[in-house]
Amino acid sequence: MAIDVDKFLADVSNVSALSIDEYSSRLRAAILATPRMGKVSSFFQLSDGDKKYGQNDCTFGGVDCKDMVTRLGIATASVVLSKLGDARGFNGLADGAEAAKVRDATMQELMPWLFLDHINRALAQGSVKLSLADIRKDDALVLDFKKTLSSAAFNPITGREDHHYAETLLFIYEFFEAGADMKIPTDPSQLKSKEVLAHWSATHPDNSYKTDVKLLKKFAGLLGRSSATVFNPTRLASAEISSYLRQLQIAGLLFKPDISDTMKQSAEAVLDGTFFDAEYNKAYQVQGHTLLNSWQEQIDDATPSNFWRVGWTSATSDHKYDAMTAADWYGDKVFQWVNENSDYNFIKKDHIVAKVELYGGTRINPHTGDPIPTCFAPGTQIMTFNFGTTAIEELREGTQVLTRADPQQWGICSSETVKLPCPERLFGINGEGAFFTAGHPFFTTTGLRAIDPEAARRENPWIEVGTLKIGHQLLRVRQDDTSSYETVEIRTIEALKSEHQFVYGVHLREGLRSYHANGYLVALNYPEITVASVAQALQSFPPQQRLGLLAGLRELAPLLQRFGGSTVLELLERE
């Protein structure tokens, strides 16, 4: 059945401006439907207003926009995450500035399909009740439509002064030419509808507009906005109307300089960017820019009910108790999301370490189960006088160890070999790899601190140690000057399921009770009562008597624990 062009144009004339609120809501719903948001989608709650549009997939105008919607969602979520005010350092997982660029470009990439969807919904309420894709199949209608737009009497810019009508007509013209394969060029001379634009630009019922700058600005604003649905000079939704006008002028589709001096001056002003001031740019803002601004306002909204902020706050605060580490683990789903989306360049890959779960929590529960030693993984580098930096397991009696860098002071290793069974997990900071146990104390700008201070005190009851948290400043020897320190802020704390059999510590017979592990100043937390000294004394007794003495020591375990000797007793029994 043939479609009457007049009825079709009447339906098109009733297409209103695209609703920014509606498409913001529908985009949020579509984003949550993408697989890449699945890990954290349960933390983001759509409002009743968002749900009323029934958007549950990424289809707009009959076109599958999943890739674009996914990219917009990940970029937007990353911008918000980077601005999140949290003490655990989650905001360091995304580069907000880079993510904002991707969000801007992707919003523009989506705009044609959002506009197509908007037109189709409006046409469904009209007399034709068909989508543009179906109407396009009517060759006679398409031909009549193109002839009408180019006819001498037809000019929605200077006639109705209705840019909504004009932009809808231009978009339909381009869609009729290419269908779902239509591309949005940066150069308007590549448009199929360029002859229509040229016709609209050249015909004006009032000759006074040729010499009236105010009228010229109004005409240019209307023409620029009308063409913004079919081309974009920067491929960014944030493009100002002045950049559209410049490209139209370059393509010969705006002012004709030879008509009048006023038009010539206006053409020059368009090219050098002085034709429109900030007020005009805002007054004639194109719909893609308007949608992007609204999207940004939603991100910046600080109200408690804000969709994006509430979602990320909930996700980063979500935690669970892990009996293996006796710790609260925060943001597990966040890190799964980061890992899944680390192929985007604005996700901070330096925070993603192979086989490491990022440890977002800082509260360690009272220690339960088997004791955790306060030691380091094999391969941890210790600063020595004799051999430079040396793996901790290679230290020998007599090795001189750097105990302070400023001023430099040295201690001497004793005959004690500090070698203990490795716990299930080791910890690290800032993605540098896990190398220490939860109970080992580090020097910070606010005193000694360990992830698990209870474990530290269990080994050495005399030590005054607090909890090590994200935001604390560690002391590390400078690489370019080993006689001074730099401070290192803890941005993340990581935990790795250990593959080592043993961990190692340091014991000194002379010097300060400290040393440097991987450059960080750490406390020597091994008790004064050593395995070597007790074992050496026990060697002077016959075997049967030694067993009796060990049994007696076991009975003194509560007392030994008060003096840091419980670890020694455990090692002696193993010996």
Image: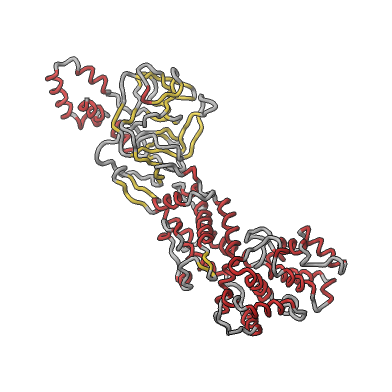
- Between 549 and 266, the one lying in front of the other is 266
Q: How many marks?
A: 0
Residue positioned 59% across, 54% down in the render: 101
Quarter of the image containing the C terminus? top left
Against 274, residue 116 (above or below) is below
Where's residue 560, x and y in %? 22, 29
**Quadrant in the picture for residue 258:** bottom right
Could you tell whether 491 is left or right of 565 in the image? right
Determine the residue positioned at 23% across, 29% down.
570
Residue found at x 52% / y 28%: 479
Q: Nearer the viewer, residue 257 or 9?
A: 9
Q: Identify whether 133 is placed above or below 528.
A: below
Q: Is residue 438 visible?
A: no
| Image position, residue 28 (x, y; %) | 49, 64
Q: Quadrant of residue 371?
A: top left
Q: Pick out the residue farthest to the top.
A: 540
Q: Is residue 501 in view from this perspective?
A: yes
Q: Give the quadrant of the N terminus.
A: bottom right
Q: Which residue corresponds to the image point at 49% horizontal and 45% vertical from the top-left? A: 349
Q: Is residue 91 left or right of 146 when viewed as pictured?
A: left
Horizontal and vertical percent position of residue 409: 45, 21
| x, y percent for residue 481 | 54, 26
Of 213 and 133, the residue lying toward us: 133
Locate residue 347 relative to residue 229 in the image: left or right.
left
Q: How is the image coloured?
A: secondary structure
Task: Using the rendered view, name the quadrant where residue 555 is placed.
Answer: top left
